[in-house]
Image: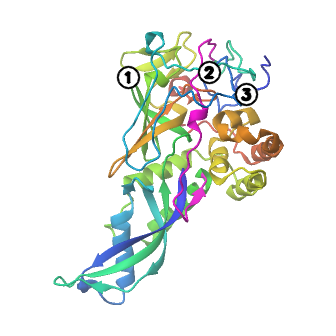
Amino acid sequence: MEKGGKAYAGKGKTPFKVVASKRGSSSGREKEPVNVSPVEIDSDSDSEGFIEEIDYSKSNGKLSSKGTSGKDGKGFSSGKAGGKGGVYSSSKKPPKRDDLKLQLETPSGARVVMDCEAADILQQIQEQMVILSEDPTIKFPLSFDKAYQYTKEGKQYSDTKSVKDILESLKNCGVNDGEICMIANSGPETVEEVYALIPSLKENRYENEEPIKEALSKLSEVKLPNICGRKN
Amino acid sequence: MFFHIVLERKIQLHPRYFGPHLREKLVSKLMKEVEGTCSGRHGFVVAITGVEDIGKGLIREGTGFVTFPVKYQCVVFRPFKGEILEAVVTMVNKMGFFAEAGPVQIFVSNHLIPDDMEYQAGDMPNYTTSDGSVKIQKDSEVRLKIMGTRVDATEIFCIGTIKDDFLGVISDPGAAS
């Protein structure tokens, strides 16, 4: 198992993305059985409740994770890795992830907006409102403030246009708008992280791996230094 | 994630507002009525970014009010199943924890927290690994994956998981202080 492959979990290398939960078993699940679903939640309709079918048949009520034992062991090393987020050493199987592919249902005519773009748009609106608003009854709703705060504190890039240009090129290898947006929003550092977070991209791995690697290295150039998270 | 979208709404205006500032009045009424609302289809309408078209008004019988169809562009925020979000923990209890990502609330059940994190009660309830190296408490920032959503008239609730690779704590307020 190659530990260095990730350079992620720790050693203070990435103050921003120190993520805790990486288990010993793995990331690669390209050939998973499709019919096994430990967790099925129907969320694609507009107003349905949670419909969970969680298999608690394993002892102590823990989530079952059939068919997900690691195959390729991409360096999700067990043991400690220092930093804030230690790597979990665990022989327990992670939940099946391919069930959780991004299910983006964009209404017709909608354009996906990356968080960094949204930050610029909302900032502009806020500045305009301060200057132009003659009607004191117009106030920003709570959701505006929260969304604005969210985008502002999560801002990772120095230049939104560059991010857009860099990631736009991924469309040529079949990466869709939603996936591009997720890459931009989550700010991954390695291609393995991209595949772990957006499993749908693994299907065309042979086609998109190199372009994604290139895009990530370009993105790292426009990343803001010393991001310490949304609450800093 | 955020979207930019064109929507349409019928705005009713009292005749006393008819005059040179009719458009401004319509826009401000539109903002009051629409911004901050939430629909299952589009999510939270965060802000109106522009008005594309205001159609011809139609007088409503008996009231004198006029209804104008208004097409407007807006930014909406809607979470999707499978989406990765970075959220701030707002409450921790033995059932799991609640976190917020923008206007959206997410609940992460203790079944979807890694097995080696245990609930610790106290003034500042938290989930901690046995060696204490990772802690989730109020104000911690976590990266999570949306597993499901439920939408009602005014809010969107999500359930999420941190029990997967590259998910979990990003920043721990306790560690920073």
| The residue stretch that appears in magenta | A88-114
Write down the residue under mark 2: A67
Chain letter of disc 1?
B
Quadrant of the snapshot with the N terminus of chain A? top right
What is the C-alpha distance between the residues marked 2 and 3? Answer: 33 Å
Please name the amino acid that badge 1 sits on: Met
Q: Secondary structure at mark 2?
A: loop
Residue depicted at x 67% and y 18%: A25
Residue depicted at x 78% and y 44%: A212
Please state the horizontal and vertical placement of residue B162, each as a whole percent of the image. Answer: 54, 28
Q: Is residue A113 magenta?
A: yes
What is the C-alpha distance between the residues marked 2 and 1? Answer: 26 Å
Q: Quadrant of residue A198?
A: top right
> In front: mark 3 or mark 1?
1
Judged from this view, the residue extending furthest toward the left is B62
Write down the residue under mark 1: B95
Please name the amino acid that badge 2 sits on: Gly
Please state the horizontal and vertical placement of residue A8, each as a whole percent of the image. Answer: 71, 27
Q: Callout 2: 10 Å neighbours few (<14), some, many (20+)?
A: some
Looking at the image, do the residues carrying marks 2 and 3 touch, with CB atoms under 8 Å apart? no
| Residue B106 drawn above or below residue A146 | above
What secondary structure prevails in the magenta region?
Answer: loop
Write down the residue under mark 3: A13
Residue A220 visible at all: yes
Looking at the image, do the residues carrying marks 3 and 1 touch, with CB atoms under 8 Å apart? no
Residue depicted at x 33% and y 51%: B154
Please name the amino acid that badge 3 sits on: Lys
Quadrant of the snapshot with the C terminus of chain A? top right
Chain letter of disc 3?
A
Looking at the image, do the residues carrying marks 2 and 1 touch, with CB atoms under 8 Å apart? no
| Mark carried by residue A224 | none
| Residue B134 drawn above or below residue B42 | above
